[in-house]
Image (tube, grey):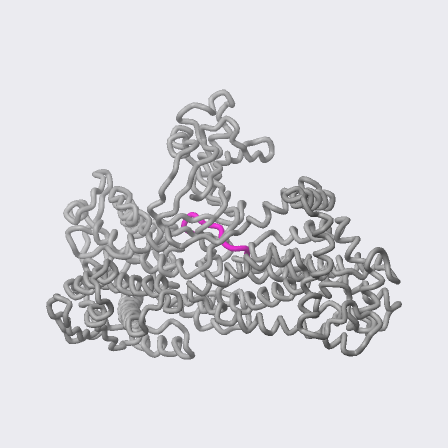
């Protein structure tokens, strides 16, 4: 692994946490049920139990839906009627706990957290009091948590429609049944719905239907009253009587007279009582911990990742696909002539280049038919579509088989067209900024022959059109249907052509990897193919399922695997534009070739290893620039794939070893580091510690051999462990070459602020057997 990175909670950890949630919920239910009252209890319990037993109407608001649920529990073949209905409260309270724990599990908490939080809540006095008697408050807690569970921001996008619908239904039932929940839930849910409408989220279209269906629960009141039960509070048979009952008009009027004149004091008193009850249930520390826990795992924007992808996704295509050749050991003169700064003390034998030079193929461009009507832009050039790069025998058949079944892996040769000049010029009567930007982008799209630039301009056109459609919904501003349809056509055409270019680019990249003319190994393409063959396997947490679920293409998956191998040593210097490091990496490989020629067994093994970086210097005057360009090309595909994966939110670790002077310079408290290259970490500290030892075991041993009074000198060894909470990292453990490394990978452009650096007098240390293993460097991602 390139220094590793932590990721989402591991699949086995997620399963264990989910299992813990159900187990804790059942234990809480059993705990509450053991003490459930066998008969009616204090306050309104007897009246509510009577309504539940005979399917009647309880006091206002009537809590529509709760009485039928109580009546359903009377069918249980255990205990008295009172005990059976008390079990309903126990089940509701346990269900509320289960939903809370489920939200924590979504955020990737440790599987042991439910075993602490669940019993802690069940032992709270409020939950015990109301979860063991026939009362409405357990039902209220269940509806509240179901609403929060449905509207949780951590819900995966593919499940958002169903979860949001459940949240809407729970909120509507709670609104009909509980006056305080109306104040708490209605503004929040309506606001979320309006925002979703503006964003065109699918669940917003289903929300009105969910509201109507959930509101049907109110019909239980007049239907029950029509039966003439003994418990028939308010006789809610007419529409006005039902409305007065669910609004609790009589009770509100009574309390209004008593509270008249209190004003804000009444609200303040209620807030203090609520806070006191929460503190009583959870303790002050527990209350603060509960608030903090709900802030864990917030999802963060991919803006930085996507910006990094744009920065590093353009330059690799300047010279077209890069082709490399076999290399025999070089002589000193030939090394210097090729552009490498090779030290004089190394002696090399003669070499010869095998295989002729293969010029890069022309980029494939889909045909375009622009009319340029009214746009003031020149007519675009039209080119015949060249053939795609040649691929090994059987390669096309293998790809065709993998792309069957609708998987997002095909690089089909579609002939997409774009006519946006005409549509843009007709979309407005006024030439506003959005129109001008899109016109310039379309003009630039035709003016350039560079594939990366074309991709960028197409993305600009698509994004501008999409932004305008979101900003100007027809239902809100009354924009004409014709204008909106033109912009939809602009967006869809740009997206189609953009996908065509990307498919062709994927094909060229995979062909180059397969040809083994790049320093990365074609073995990674084989591994990626194997992953995608198993995408429909039974394991929902496997690499194939992950790649298929998030729509990773074969090229993106292969690029991630390329980075996870030894090629990261060349990719990161390319992103950092560090020619000196790239030069040393190239020299290191040449040195291994020479050692292998001299029958060095260790070097021979590394050269033969399919995972080793197989750098074959190009037959050019500037191999460093060639390697830099290829490294950027690998990075562009890897960044594109990472952007499709969900963010990992959890603690990550990265170990290393420097001198104290270097560490003091690199990790100063308060500094903000912009990482131009990929950053690898691990979600497991022991993995990162192993990399720290592998980097420089002698340095670590030397540190412990230095007298204590000399360890603070500038040249003293300084093993360290960088740790922080990930916000934008991606869990690639199941996609990488070695899943045991639990790698969390950060795309170029991530930032860290050092909170407690090497210069901090309070920095923690890890001590093992009386010796300091390393010093912790604490940071936060910004």
Task: Please give left or right for residue 699 compared with residue 141 in the image.
Answer: left
Magenta stretch, residue numbers:
1-10
How many numbered tags mark residues here? Answer: 0
Relative image position of residue 465 (x, y in whole percent):
30, 65
Q: Nearer the viewer, residue 247 or 283?
A: 247
Q: Nearer the viewer, residue 756 or 733?
A: 756
Relative image position of residue 332 (x, y in whole percent):
18, 45
Question: Does the magenta portion include 9?
Answer: yes
Question: Does the magenta portion include 522?
Answer: no
Residue at the spot 35% in from the left edge and 68% down from the top edge: 478
Q: Nearer the viewer, residue 578 or 341?
A: 578
Q: Quadrant of residue 583?
A: top left
Q: Nearer the viewer, residue 206 or 20?
A: 206
Q: Is the residue 202 above or below the residue 101 in the image? A: below
Relative image position of residue 115 (x, y in whole percent):
69, 52
Residue lying furthest left: 378
Question: Is residue 66 in sight in this rendering?
Answer: yes
Question: Is residue 453 in sight in this rendering?
Answer: no
Residue lying furthest top: 709
Give the overall secondary structure of the magenta segment: loop
Residue at the spot 23% in from the left edge and 67% down from the top edge: 428
Where is the C terminus found, in terms of image quarters? top left
Task: Please give left or right for residue 226 compared with residue 169 in the image.
Answer: right
Task: Please give left or right for residue 41 compared with residue 451 in the image.
Answer: right
Task: Please give left or right for residue 772 compared with residue 97 in the image.
Answer: left
Residue at the spot 19% in from the left edge and 58% down from the top edge: 318
Q: Is the residue 685 above or below the residue 239 in the image? A: above
Relative image position of residue 15 (x, y in whole percent):
61, 61
């Amino acid at each position: 692994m390139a220094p590793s990175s932590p990721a989402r909670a591991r699949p086995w950890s997620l399963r264990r946490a989910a299992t813990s949630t159900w187990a804790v919920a059942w234990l809480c239910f059993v705990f509450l049920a053991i003490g459930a009252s066998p008969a009616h209890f204090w306050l309104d319990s007897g009246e509510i139990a009577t309504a539940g037993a005979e399917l009647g109407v309880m006091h206002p608001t009537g809590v529509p839906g709760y009485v039928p649920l109580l009546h359903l529990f009377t069918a249980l073949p255990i205990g008295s009627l009172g005990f059976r209905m008390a079990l309903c409260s126990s089940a509701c309270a346990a269900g509320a706990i289960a939903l809370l724990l489920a939200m924590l599990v979504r955020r990737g908490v440790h599987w042991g957290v439910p075993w602490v939080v669940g019993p802690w809540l069940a032992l709270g006095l409020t939950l015990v009091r109301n979860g063991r008697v026939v009362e409405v408050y357990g039902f209220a807690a269940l509806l509240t948590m179901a609403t929060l569970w449905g509207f949780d921001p951590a819900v995966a996008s593919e499940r958002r429609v169903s979860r949001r619908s459940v949240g809407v239904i729970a909120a509507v039932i709670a609104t009909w049944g509980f006056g305080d929940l109306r104040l708490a839930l209605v503004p929040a849910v309506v606001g979320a719905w309006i925002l979703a409408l503006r964003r065109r989220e699918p669940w917003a279209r289903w929300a009105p239907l969910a509201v109507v269906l959930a509101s049907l629960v109110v019909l239980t009141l007049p239907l029950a009253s029509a039966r003439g039960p003994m418990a028939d509070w308010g006789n809610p048979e007419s529409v006005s009587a039902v409305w007065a009952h669910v609004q609790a008009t009589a009770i509100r009027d009574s309390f209004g007279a008593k509270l008249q004149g209190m004003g804000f004091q009444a609200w303040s008193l209620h807030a203090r009582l609520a806070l006191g009850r929460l503190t009583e249930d959870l303790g002050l520390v527990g209350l603060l911990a509960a608030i903090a826990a709900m802030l864990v795992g917030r999802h963060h924007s991919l803006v930085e990742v996507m910006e990094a992808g744009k920065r590093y996704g353009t330059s690799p295509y300047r010279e077209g696909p890069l082709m490399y050749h076999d290399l025999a050991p070089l002589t000193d003169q030939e090394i210097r002539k090729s552009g490498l700064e090779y030290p004089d003390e190394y002696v090399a034998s003669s070499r010869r280049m095998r295989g002729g030079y293969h010029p890069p193929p022309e980029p494939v461009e889909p045909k375009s038919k622009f009319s340029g009507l009214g746009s003031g832009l020149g007519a675009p050039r039209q080119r015949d579509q060249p053939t795609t790069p040649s691929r090994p025998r059987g390669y096309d058949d293998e790809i065709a088989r993998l792309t069957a079944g609708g998987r997002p892996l095909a690089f089909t040769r579609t002939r997409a067209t774009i006519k946006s000049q005409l549509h843009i010029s007709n979309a407005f009567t006024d030439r506003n900024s959005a129109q001008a930007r899109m016109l310039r982008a379309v003009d630039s799209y035709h003016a350039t022959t560079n594939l990366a630039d074309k991709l960028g301009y197409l993305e600009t056109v698509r994004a501008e059109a999409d932004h305008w459609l979101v900003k100007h919904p027809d239902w809100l501003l009354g924009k004409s249907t014709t204008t909106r349809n033109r912009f939809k056509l602009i967006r869809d055409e740009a997206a189609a052509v953009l996908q065509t270019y990307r498919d062709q680019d994927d094909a060229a990249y995979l062909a180059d990897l397969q040809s083994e003319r790049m320093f990365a190994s074609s073995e990674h393409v084989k591994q990626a193919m194997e992953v995608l063959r198993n995408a429909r396997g039974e394991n929902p947490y496997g690499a194939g399922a992950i790649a298929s679920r998030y729509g990773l293409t074969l090229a993106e998956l292969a690029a991630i695997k390329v980075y996870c191998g030894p090629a990261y040593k060349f990719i990161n210097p390319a992103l950092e534009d560090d020619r000196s490091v790239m030069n040393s990496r190239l020299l290191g490989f040449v040195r291994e070739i020479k050692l292998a020629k001299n029958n060095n067994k260790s070097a021979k093994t590394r050269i033969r290893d399919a995972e080793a970086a197989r750098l074959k210097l190009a037959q050019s005057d500037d191999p460093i620039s060639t390697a830099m360009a290829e490294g950027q090309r690998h990075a562009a595909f890897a960044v594109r794939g990472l952007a499709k994966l969900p963010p990992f939110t959890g603690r990550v670790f990265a170990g290393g070893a420097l001198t104290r002077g270097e560490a003091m310079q690199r990790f100063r408290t308060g500094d903000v580091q912009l990482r131009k290259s990929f950053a690898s970490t691990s979600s497991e500290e022991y993995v990162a510690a192993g990399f720290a030892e592998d980097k420089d075991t002698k340095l670590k041993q030397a540190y412990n051999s230095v007298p204590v009074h000399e360890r603070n000198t500038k040249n003293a060894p300084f093993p360290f462990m960088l740790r922080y909470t990930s916000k934008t990292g991606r869990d690639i453990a199941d996609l990488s070459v070695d899943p045991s490394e639990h790698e969390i990978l950060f795309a170029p452009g991530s930032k860290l602020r050092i909170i407690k650096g090497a210069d901090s007098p309070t920095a923690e240390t890890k001590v093992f057997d009386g010796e300091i293993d390393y010093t912790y460097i604490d940071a936060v991602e910004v």
